[in-house]
């Protein structure tokens, strides 16, 4: 299987290198048939091609079995018409990686042990409040007159149905509960459509339960009683915010794995940003991208019925738990002394043991 590796910006090179250290250990232990290809996105691509997301890279990604997508410095890019393309949006929309799967689980010695969390946020990521992916041509954000700015939200029954279906399919493998998060008391048509589609899908899963919660109440419940949630299904913008909150409450945003999955392709991508202020210092926590890569292996294992890939995914997740349980083997953001590479080697050694 061919995996396309795209380090991205800021700390991307460092955490991607660390992730490959861990993956090589998994390859050696489980005999995985993985081949890594490398290319460039972000500023590295821009300097050579005039765009942060070359079409050739997207086509190469389409031909691979999976993608490791490093963080991007989108806020620092030039305007879109000058080549500053939002790489995450381009990959999600053009490759139809519509399900952004974001787990949040409390790990030993981290987070709030008195309020443990074990949930997954299922984020529809091809539409919603994000104007860069809502129009066939032109921008969904515009200024009709000076002093007035407007932005369009797009919600389709098609996108709502399939993220709801993936949510219930996941819930069947967990505790069997899906919570639909919305703001239908104000977004009557858009969130109303979302809820209608989720309820239609729920009828096909009588072994699962469905409830729904308004977005602001959901944020409060994540703080007060996160154990009430199993799988949260929601639209793009809501999920983006809730997943960062959940990850930080469960331990740290730096521990938050994530994949963008479509029907035939998936990309591992850390939840956090590119952190250019600490780039090149070998102090970045690579856990999020390592766990994202493990999720990618798990997705590939399920798709291809490959028990070795599934076993490798579990081994990486378990090795992360084992290393993080020791405060002396954590990275500086978690109060530990290990640099990026040293942490990756500790995880790799645990896998190999």
Image (tube, rainbow, N blue to C red):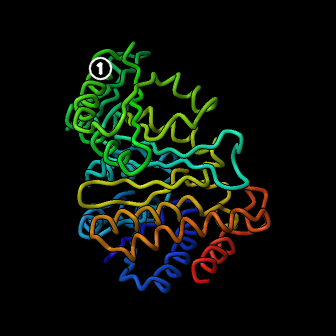
The residue shown at (51%, 51%) is: 271
Residue 124: image quadrant is top left
Is 105 on the left-hand or right-hand side of 212?
right
Q: Quadrant of the C terminus?
A: bottom right
Marker count (numbered): 1
Q: Residue 62 versus residue 211: which sits nearer the camera? A: 211
**x and y, in percent, of residue 40 in the image:** 41, 67
Q: Residue at x 32, y 64 (%)?
A: 302
Q: Quadrant of the N terminus?
A: bottom left
Residue drawn at (37%, 33%), measured in percent from left and top?
Answer: 209
- The location of residue 38, given as percent across then percent down, is 40, 75
**Label 1: element kind:** helix
Front-lying residue, 240 or 108 = 108
In this rendering, the answer to whether 145 lies above or below 86 is above
Lateral position of residue 323 relative to residue 138, left or right: right
Quarter assignment of residue 221:
top right
Please give left or right for residue 263 compared with residue 253 in the image.
left
Q: Is residue 191 visible?
A: yes
Observer able to see residue 138:
no
The residue furthest front is 207
Label 1 environment density (alpha carbons within 10 Å; few <14, some 14–19, many ≥20) = some
User: Relative to residue 18, is residue 240 drawn left or right?
Assistant: left
In front here: 182 or 342?
Answer: 182
Measuring from the top left, give residue 42's x and y in whole percent. Answer: 44, 59
> x, y percentage for residue 306?
32, 74
Residue placed most toward the observer, 350 or 125: 350
Q: Label 1: which residue?
A: 192
């Amino acid at each position: 299987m061919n995996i396309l590796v795209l380090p991205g910006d800021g700390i991307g090179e460092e955490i991607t290198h660390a992730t490959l250290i861990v993956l090589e250990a998994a390859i050696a232990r489980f005999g995985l048939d993985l081949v890594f290809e490398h290319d460039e996105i972000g500023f590295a691509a821009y300097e050579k091609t005039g765009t942060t997301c070359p079409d050739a890279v997207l086509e190469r990604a389409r031909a691979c079995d999976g993608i490791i997508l490093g963080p991007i410095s989108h806020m620092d890019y030039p305007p879109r018409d000058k080549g500053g393309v939002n790489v995450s949006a381009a990959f999600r929309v053009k490759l139809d990686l519509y399900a952004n799967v974001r787990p949040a689980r409390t790990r030993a010695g981290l987070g709030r042990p008195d309020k443990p969390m074990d949930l997954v946020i299922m984020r529809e990521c091809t539409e919603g409040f994000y104007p860069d992916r809502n129009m066939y041509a032109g921008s969904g954000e515009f200024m009709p007159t000076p002093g007035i700015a407007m932005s369009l939200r797009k919600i389709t029954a098609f996108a709502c149905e399939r993220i709801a279906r993936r949510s219930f399919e996941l819930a069947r493998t967990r505790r069997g509960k899906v919570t639909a998060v919305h703001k239908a008391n104000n977004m009557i048509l858009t969130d109303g459509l979302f809820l209608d589609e989720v309820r239609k899908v729920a009828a096909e899963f009588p072994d699962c339960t469905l409830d729904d919660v308004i977005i602001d109440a959901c944020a409060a419940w994540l703080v007060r009683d996160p154990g009430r949630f199993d799988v949260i299904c929601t639209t793009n913008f809501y999920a983006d915010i809730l997943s960062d909150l959940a990850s930080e409450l469960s331990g740290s945003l730096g521990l938050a794995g994530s994949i963008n999955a479509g029907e035939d392709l998936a990309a591992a991508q850390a939840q956090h940003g590119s952190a250019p202020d600490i780039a090149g210092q070998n102090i970045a926590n690579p856990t999020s991208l390592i766990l994202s890569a493990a999720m990618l292996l798990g997705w590939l294992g399920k798709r291809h019925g490959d028990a070795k890939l599934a076993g490798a995914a579990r081994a990486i997740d378990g090795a992360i738990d084992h290393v993080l349980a020791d405060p002396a083997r954590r990275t500086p953001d978690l109060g530990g002394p290990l640099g990026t590479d040293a942490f990756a080697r500790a995880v790799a050694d645990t896998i190999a043991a």
